Image: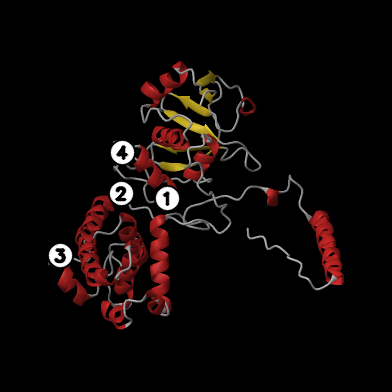
Amino acid sequence: MIVRKLIPTLLGAAVVFTTAIILLIVLVLGLLTAPSKDASAAEEPTCTPGGGNSSAVVVPDEYQDYVESAAKESGLSVGIIAAQLKAESNWDPKAVSPVGAKGLAQFMPETWKEFGDGGDPFNPKDAIAAQGRYMKHLKNLVKDHAKGDKNLVELTLAAYNAGPGKVKELGYDMNKINKIEETRNYVENITKAAKGDYTTDCEDPGDGGARGDGDILKTAKHLAWDKRVQLPRSTAARHGEDAAKPEYVKASQKYNKSVTTAFFTDCGVYVATVMRMSGADKKFPLRGTTDVQLPYLKQSDKYKTFKPKSEGDLKAGDIMITPGHIYIYSGKRRSGPANTSLAASLYTRPPSGQDTYGFGSYTAARLVKG
């Protein structure tokens, strides 16, 4: 929120007095109309992926390997290629546009002749591979005119939508290209979907514990969506990457470089990333919920462990763990029991909100020595 300060000028005592009276009236009215602390409007704003009720791009299981190969071929991110395919055909391999574009990647016949390698535009494997080749071609056309990586992606997407000839005609200048409304919207929508944007009412998390100040809760909330994000089950190595909060994608790869399987949907990896990134426990085990992390918490003198009987026994930042699952209690942020904790769920969910449960069977661990 931007707060504008009223700076009185040297226009005389009358102006200063009048300003003071106005401010006093505004203050009184504000106090009279302000909602109570219990009102729903006063609750903390939430972050959700993709804006509104949508979610970040999720690649269907059957296409994941193809999309990753196309991304590698093009030199662009998996998110960009996936967001394009989602926008072009909504993952419908039989899609045909009114102007004759075909398949998942919506190739026009002439373009397909050049980049389809003799394949079938309605075959997902062929179509996605062609998308990778075509985007590589466009990227090479504009790369000498790009000003940094971000601009390179924008120019490549603009060339895809408006045509490389139009981008060249406009001097590879995104300010000029953006005057084409369709192209501007296309570039903005694809790049936004590729990284997973925030709702407009999402509280800016700042650095969210990236300074290593020991704040478990702040870091946990910085790395996870407030609301539950559910995915189709998949054992693919990078499943959940496009649906995870961008901050978590970056952090999890920084702190857990050796982890590849179920990277973005592993509850143990999420908690380990929180503990290491926050600086609360830089030696927290990376994985092994049952065999490693549970014994570590019980045996370490850094933690007080106990069996909570109800949510009232917990404090925000407590770790809840049982054989097979681990999560972080984040406290009540709104009315009702839902989403009072944060966790990932193997193969089915990136870090996001969940209910608090497991009383009697779960062990709670509270950090007492940072």
Classify mark 2: residues with Cα within 10 Å, few (<14), some (14-19) or many (20+): some
SS class, disc 1: helix
Which mark, residue 339? none
Real-space CA distance between mark 2 and mark 1, rounded to the nearest whole angstrom: 20 Å
Question: Mark 4 and mark 1 in contact (Cβ < 8 Å)?
Answer: no
Q: Which residue is mark 2?
A: 61
Residue 30: image quadrant is bottom right
Q: Amino acid at mark 2?
A: Asp
Which dot, 4 or 2, sits closer to the camera? Answer: 4
Q: Which residue is mark 4?
A: 257
State the image coordinates of residue 164 (x, y, percent, origin top left). 27, 77
Real-space CA distance between mark 3 and mark 1, rounded to the nearest whole angstrom: 35 Å
Question: Mark 1 and mark 2 in contact (Cβ < 8 Å)?
Answer: no
State the image coordinates of residue 194 (x, y, percent, origin top left). 38, 58
Q: Which residue is mark 1?
A: 246
The earlier-in-sequence mark between 4 and 3 is 3
Real-space CA distance between mark 3 and mark 2, rounded to the nearest whole angstrom: 22 Å
The earlier-in-sequence mark between 3 and 1 is 3
The earlier-in-sequence mark between 2 and 1 is 2
SS class, disc 3: loop
Q: Which residue is mark 3?
A: 119
Above or below — where is 199 with respect to 105? above
Looking at the image, residue 199 sits to the left or right of residue 273; the answer is: right
Q: Is residue 27 visible?
A: yes
Q: Amino acid at mark 3?
A: Gly
Classify mark 3: residues with Cα within 10 Å, few (<14), some (14-19) or many (20+): some
State the image coordinates of residue 125 (x, y, percent, origin top left). 21, 58
The earlier-in-sequence mark between 4 and 2 is 2
